[in-house]
Image: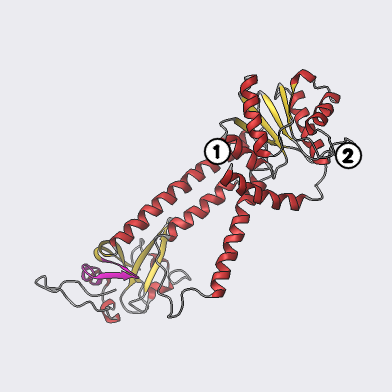
Amino acid sequence: MASPRRAPGGAPAPVAPLEAAFYARPVVEVARDMLGCIVRHGSTAGVIVETEAYHDSEAACHAHVGVTPRTHILFGPPGRAYVYRSYGIHALLNAVCEDEGTGAAVLIRALEPLQGLELMRARRIGAILLGGLAALAIVDAVGFFVSLARGSIQTPAVVPASLAVAVCLGALAAELHVEPLPRALGPRWTVRRAIFCAATCAVVAVALPLVRMITFGPTRYERRADCAVVFGARVWDDGTPSLALADRVDEAIRLYHRGAVRKLVMSGAVEPNGRSEPDVMRARAEEAGVPREDILLDEAGVDTGATVRNTARLMREERLRSALAVSHYYHEPRVKMLFDRAGVRVHTVPARMTRRLVKEPYFLLREVAAFYHSFLLE
């Protein structure tokens, strides 16, 4: 903290740090004399225009409870800074006053910007934007817990991804208010620092879709819809469906027999061995009692994007307004994203797995790359 910016008479005054002796006085006097002093941090500075004095004899003072791990700073020596969080959001700056052993401090309530005004504005705008996004994420998380309590969704995920996003955005918003302390002289970037930053970015890039896969992915948004869209998977040379494909078709069959849907859309490709995934899917559904006239086929669903596009067209032709997307949990976040982009009202129902897939770790990592491909290019 520096001395006043103006000397008596309004002439500019030299700015010099205040000595500890300035604070070793009654807290009320210090609070009065701090008005007009300058607080400087990094490239920003402001003139103190409002203060409050607190003494350990007052119940409103943190030092009133005595010396604790939190309050010991307030008991001296004078001239130290006591900073605490208000509601876990705002960092409040106090100057410790009076003789050592007495709990007293001046709270700096308001500053008039003096230097770095544009940076202050940019920080505030950024914090407001990030805070607004965090608030939206919290609203989404509240909706998740309400739906879970009502039984309209079922999920093994304890915490929704939106809550983790809200925490991260809130932390970033708070961080915008803090300017890093000056670094020691030396290069800002080194090879080690560059490698660390690149590795961190890579970990975050992989983690983001993975978090969606393990939170949103296994959540069942089952409800009444016009049809269920079943995404294809491998068919073996002898014509039997792979375990992944069988689980997906069986899930759709359960939805049909429970009356959740009235049509099944089987989408997939024709395998290099000549086997048609949709044909095999239809045959399994018919064996389980689903009438052929309630099964629609799409043999051009060579990938997820193609299935979404073809299904959107097919639903328009058949006048189907809503759908349940049936696939494995790791696939569902990308499915939902693409259907939303196509303007199709879809809820996801992950297939119950007979057992864990042997190649499941590979499928998860492959889906990370596929998620970014779809996000950027589809």
Residue 336 counted in the magenta span: no
Q: Judge whether residue 40 is colored magenta.
A: yes
Q: Residue at x 43, y 73 (%)?
A: 72
The spot of residue 164 in percent (x, y) is 56, 51
For disc 2, the neighbor class at 10 Å (few under 14, some 14 to 19, many from 20) is few
Task: Name the disc covering residue 337, or none.
Answer: none
Find residue 219 and report its horizontal and vertical position in percent. Answer: 67, 40
Q: Considering depth in this image, is 349 or 358 the residue closer to the camera?
A: 358
Please give the label number shown on residue 143: 1
Quadrant including the C terminus:
top right
Q: Inspect the image, locate mark 2, and give the three-letter code of the amino acid beneath it.
A: Asp
Q: Which residue is mark 2?
A: 237
Extent of the magenta region: 30-46
The image position of residue 153, as x and y in percent, is: 65, 35
Let me know if residue 339 appears in the view.
Answer: yes
Q: Residue at x 83, y 34 (%)?
A: 275
